[in-house]
Amino acid sequence: MYLRPSMVEEALAALAEGGPTTILAGGTDYYPARVGRPLTEDILDITAIAALRGIGERDGALRIGAAVRWTEIAEAALPPSLRCLQLAAREIGGRQIQNAGTLAGNLCNASPAADGVPCLLALDAEVELASARGTRRLPVAEFVRGNRRTARRPDELMTAIIVPRCAEAARSTFLKLGARRYLVISIVMVAALIEAAPDGAIAAARIAVGACSAAAQRLPLLEAVLRGRRLASGIGCLVAAEHLGELAPIDDVRGTAAYRREAARRLVARALDELAAEAAA
Amino acid sequence: MSATEPRIAFTLNGADTTVTAAPIRRLAAVLREECGLTGTKIGCDAGDCGACTVLVDGAQLCACLVPVGQVAGRRITTIEGLAADPRYDALRQSFHRHGAAQCGICTPGMLMAAADLLARAPRPDAAMTADALGGVLCRCTGYRKIIDAVLDVAGAEAPPLPAAGEAVGARMPKVDGLAKLDGTERYGADEGPAEALWLKAIRSPHAAARFTLGDLRALRAKYPGLVRILTAADIPGKNSFGIYPDIKDQPVLAEGVVRFRGEAVLALVGDAETIAAIGEEEVPIAWHIEAPVIGVAAALRSGAPALHAAHPDNVLIKGRVLSGDVEAALASAAAVVTGEFSTAFVEHAYIEPEAGYARRVGDRIEIFACTQTPYMDRDEVARIMGLSPEQVRIIPSAVGGGFGGKLDLSLQPLIATAAWLTGRPVRCIYTRPESMMSTTKRHPAHIKARIAADAEGRLLAVDFHADFNTGAYASWGPTVANRVPVHASGPYRVAAVRAETRAVYTNETPAGAFRGFGVPQTVIATETLLDELAEKLDLDPLELRHRNALRVGDRTATGQVLQASAGLAACLDALRPRWREARAAAAAANAGATGPLRRGVGLAAMWYGIGNTSMSNPSTMRVGIDRVGRITLYSGAVDIGQGSNTILSQICADALGVPVAAIRLVTGDTDRTPDAGKTSASRQTFISGAAAKVAGEALRRQVLERAGAGPAARLLVESGRIFVEESGERHALDFSDLPVSNESGDVLSATGRFDPPTTALDADGQGVPYATYAFAAQMAEIEVDTGLGTVRLRRIVAAHDVGRAVNPREVEGQIHGGIAQGIGLALMEEYLPGRTENLHDYLVPTFGDVPPIECLLIEDPEPLGPYGAKGIGEPALIPTAPAILNAIYHATGVRLRRVPATPDRMRAALREAGYD
Ligand SMILES: Cc1cc2nc3c(=O)[nH]c(=O)nc-3n(C[C@H](O)[C@H](O)[C@H](O)COP(=O)(O)OP(=O)(O)OC[C@H]3O[C@@H](n4cnc5c(N)ncnc54)[C@H](O)[C@@H]3O)c2cc1C
Ligand code: FES
Ligand code: FES
């Protein structure tokens, strides 16, 4: 079965029937997992649902529809706090992947190396999950549970990602470490968001690291250390190994655990230095 | 197609189109199979290569990731649509003019991505171009000429093709280039009779195991479309193959035992839908898993299980070169450097997976498939089929990249056997993981070497021991074991040499031929040690090499006295000003550096014997003229993108004395072309080129004789007719009264044959292994991020003595592509069975990983070569990796002895060296 509804309700009804339905958006995670294998699942294709398209404001928050592609995110006019997500969008695969893949798919696929997740953690974003039973919202940190594990119930559809409005002064960045320039899965990636007062005092810092644990994580210890400090040159030096204690990187073909841990610390420091340099400019 | 499948309507290249297909089917498959548009290529089916890029509503997408159900009502443009659209003529012409397509398999994807870019930004810069095309991989070109082509889209048209006598040395575009730009080139997957059955091999998931096949009746009952299940018992002739006449150690289908993960166990043959529907887990195979022998050390351990009874110690073969007294030289040396090095399995990663079809024609079998060696395929398939070689016809498809990986049989014996037994044509296309797990790799090497010099830096001794992991089957292992010792002392005069190699069996992927046959691994050891030696002696690395460079009249370690064409010193001379400037600039940058970035400049040199080692490896070329005066070159040399069709046409045209445009080509069909030998060992320009020259000259003599003209007369070709012009008089030649002399319809015909003069090597490796050698030196400028261990290339300068650049643009293309593969070897490529069996996890350089490259072509002519030419295919790659490693040392003082130098390995070494 291949269902391609135009209304959310149709999609939810199909999911409510309880069959083992696979939701399909950009297909950029779906197809690579099935090379040389028969394509036999029942499919719910959500790309024709108008309500899932577009980026807009609602109730003071930014709402990114579940069918929004990476290219749209990269090219949209968004507040500077979302720069981390836009930078990540430009580094997903290559242009073809950015033209097809969705941020929602990136979240639902829940790879430890999903570039979107640390950005959304730094942005304190939530996901909206809808089912015939109703709609609920979950913080991204609660939604992504682990390697390929999410809190999505089988009858739920992710309908949007909701990014709360940040202070005007918030700035963010994203750094990705890979072993080649394009088409590369991150060895480590970091999203950092800092909200600083005009005098440079850090009001809020939200920093997340990906590919160093089953799911990307915030660094609460570091964030606490940064609060109240001045966002100025040399701030990266504050990042210490113990701030990354919660991370649990593994050895794989892309790098050793020890390397990941060290690189994560470095990238976090560089991300902070970059934000400081920008603030000074 | 089943009754429940819906009709899906869209606009395809401007025309309303409706297909009946399951909406989940990949658009790429539907375009190729239902719409007949095979210009869209499939390299991975996983979004990793971009070969399938098409435009959907003007935006580039990987057609292998788009469900056809999603394109309903949308506008699709494929390469065929682009080719028919005059707005893109300039783009294709620019690709043609710049040599931006080599094998051409990536080219449709590149052009589509470029079209997407140009619609958004008519005048892009290099960075925008890389960003836009970065999702398409190319394994041949090194990307630089593609960037040039996109930037020069509004540039001037190509100059006219060279006139008579001016083809050699001309930067002319490929004679067969246009078909690569409009989607019409026919690769292995692009043809197959409609009534063909499909074949899918079932392969071992285990590295070492015994197996028994279960009852296959249930499978047959469940799938009526399953026409045949091939097992080892079905092979009509000998169920074994191998490159060497005396080493046929690899079965077509395993007989109860498998020796590597990916080995074929049986093959399913049936209609397309059935074959696609059968899950591998449905095939009943009972496995008895055994402990695999992984790595050379394990294989050599006493008591290690023997992979093959004939080799109880797992040593397939040993090679050596011995000259002079190495121990005495080491003892007397002013400086000795020592090191131990290791390299990984490297995958060819051509973008075209193996593909083709076979059909039975009476008592003959015909195979259309991608290959680098049609004649060897013919003889090998004949042996497997129990047929005579004449009963086998090999029709090579266009080849979407080879690099040595398509020198071994892959699917040919399977499809041939299936077609023979069923009486129906049989097709097969390997999936990307299947291609990667089952076909050959570059040999991992473990090398120990010592190099000694006197106080002036004269090389006294090279002591070199290398073990090569040849995997489960011999393939080209003996070639590597024999070629490496000859090259171990490098392009230098060395008084005493002891070079010993072993090829060792393991339960890993068979290692075979890959651009350089072990020499790229060898120079990673020797050329980095030379740098250490220079430092010990306080000499400049370039000057050390220059001092020792082999020159004409010198004696090599095999006792061969070089008679001509030894251009290493000239290569180094050409590099010297750039070297000094770059070294100084890097040092200055580092002196002022406060952050983590350090710059470095490194150099490496190489030599490379052209053609097979100490073996007859002739080529025969034929050229003929038919009744109406058309000239045809019959070339059995397979052009795998490196440009032999163009080079041979240029040579033959000048030998005949006609414009190159007058030469038509018939290529690589074992029924129609004479044997040109394999496309390997950088031999086609030198050997087939020499044969083409002889053939062209012989035909010229026949023509002039017939015209009663002297040798200085000019031949003119005008509106398809041939004229002879002598002392101001011209008359048309008429061939219509001549009897047809061969089955091709030619009335005049000449063949040329060339076999490079070599001798066998004695037990100490003494003799003349090659008739000529290419020389080169490359310089890499890099930047290391010492905090993260990443390496960024800034520039490469490559000086290559090619004897004569028959087509400088093609030579540059080979250099660029070789360098890109050298970058991969140095920094990122490592094939791990079961772990990096796709182009997602196995990383090859992308658009952003290959820096600007400057080529310096040195022409020290080789008298045996056609117009002085030697070879370039493999030499291009060889010096790159050690040049990068030496640059890393220059930047950081860190020596890496294991490649690839991945960021984590780099960083570990940097940390050990005290970098924070
Ligand atoms: C060549 C290549 C390069 C890549 N590079 C990167 C990279 O650099 N960084 C990175 O992070 N990722 C990368 N990816 C992975 C992939 O592109 C991203 O994860 C992408 O965002 C997935 O989105 P999609 O719409 O294509 O997902 P799909 O493949 O359509 O779906 C992915 C999963 O999410 C589920 N799903 C999708 N939408 C919903 C929804 N609305 N509600 C519930 N479930 C849903 C699907 O059922 C499926 O399980 C790459 C992939 C490829 C092929
Ligand atoms: S075939 Fe589609 S990206 Fe490789
Ligand atoms: S020309 Fe690009 S892959 Fe061959």
Image: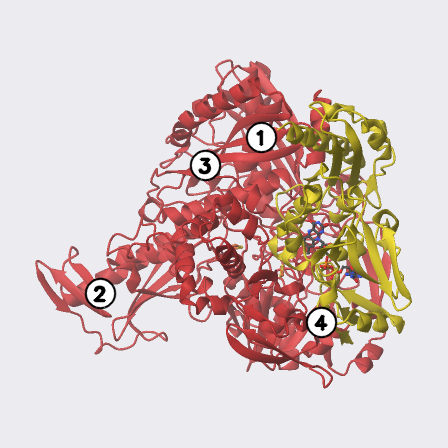
**Co-location on one chain, circles 1 and 2:** yes
- Chain identity for the colour yellow used in the image: A
- Determine the image quadrant of residue B193: bottom right
- Mark drawn on residue B24: 4
Task: Say what amino acid the circle numbered 2 marks.
Answer: Val
Q: Which residue bears the numbered disc 2? A: B717
In front: label 4 or label 1: 4
User: Residue B78's spot in the image, x, y percent?
Assistant: 53, 67
Say whether disc 4 or disc 1 marks the residue closer to the N-terminus: 4
Name the quadrant where ligand 1 sits: bottom right
Query: Under tag 1, what secondary structure?
Result: strand
Amino acid carrying mark 3 in the image: Ala
Mark positioned earlier in the residue sequence (2 or 4): 4
Tag 2 subunit: B
Q: Residue at x 28, y 57 (%)?
A: B160
Give the CA distance from mark 1 to mark 3: 18 Å
Question: Label 1 belongs to which residue?
Answer: B783
The residues bearing labels 3 and 4 have C-alpha atoms spaced at a distance of 48 Å
Badge 4 element = loop
Same chain assignment for discs 1 and 3: yes
The colour with which the image depicts chain B is red
Q: Which badge, 2 or 3, is on the more N-terminal residue?
A: 2
Number of numbered markers: 4
Front of the two marks 2 and 4: 4
Query: Residue B798: which numbered mark, if any?
Result: 3
Q: Are marks 2 and 4 on the same chain?
A: yes
Left or right: A81 as drawn, with respect to B120: right
Instruction: Give the distance between the C-alpha atoms of the residues marked 2 and 3, in whole angstroms.
Output: 39 Å
Q: Give the spatial CA distance, label 4 vs label 1.
A: 46 Å
